[in-house]
Amino acid sequence: MEFGMILYIVIIVLTAMLMIGIGIFQYGGKNPAQISTGAPPVRAEELTDVRAWNHRHGIMWMLYGVIMLAGLGLSFAFQKPLYSGMTILAAVCLPVLFIPVYHNYLKKKYMKK
């Protein structure tokens, strides 16, 4: 295995583990989980259920890490580098598009009216 491939695997695995770690930390957090969206941070007083808020955010980040690992594994199934690259790119980038959408959904669901 060449150095570039080893570096690729290490970077994806470390990044996925970081996302899973963030998810675990947020899942068990006592203060409301935050996402840097440019909006003011959500305070506990503004939420109907801080625990559920944290659990949903934690699961979201853990799922993102698992999707990255699955994309890495799936990228090895393809023989052509183009398809392999497109697979991991999709696994890393597409979930990023859904994170703010899901965060806004959770705000609507758990923010006090």
Image (spheres, helix red, strand yellow):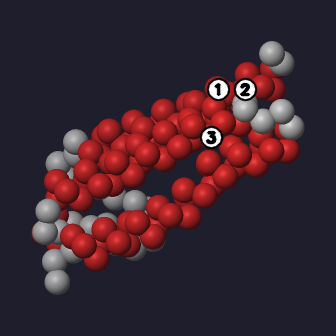
Q: Label 1, label 2: how many angstroms apart (C-alpha)?
A: 5 Å
Residue, far top: 1
Q: Nearer the viewer, residue 3 or 65?
A: 65
Question: In the picture, residue 69 is in which quadrant?
Answer: top right
Question: For mark 1, what is the residue?
Answer: 10
Q: Amino acid at mark 2?
A: Leu
Label total for image: 3
Residues at circles 1 and 2 in contact by the CB criterion of under 8 Å? yes
At mark 2, the secondary structure is helix
Pick whichever, 59 or 28, lies toward us.
59
User: What residue lies at 45% left-to-right and 70% top-to-bottom?
Assistant: 101
| Residue in view at x 27 percent, y 67 percent | 42
Q: At 57% across and 37% down in the image, what residue appears? A: 70
Q: Earlier in the sequence, mark 3 or mark 2?
A: 2
Residue receiving disc 2: 7
Indicate the amino acid at tag 3: Gly
Figure quadrant of residue 46? bottom left
Identified by mark 1, the residue type is Val
Lateral position of residue 57 relative to residue 97, left or right: left
Quick check: 37 left or right of 83? Answer: left
Mark whose residue sits in front, 1 or 3: 3
The numbered disc on residue 53 is none
Q: Which residue is mark 3?
A: 71
Q: Nearer the viewer, mark 3 or mark 2?
A: 3
The C terminus sits in image quarter: bottom left
Which residue appears farthest toward the bottom when viewing the image? 113
In percent of width and height, residue 19 lies at 46, 41
Helix, strand or loop under label 1: helix
Q: Position of residue 80 (x, y in %)?
A: 86, 37
Q: Quadrant of residue 27 in the image?
A: top left
Question: Which corner quadrant holds the N terminus?
Answer: top right
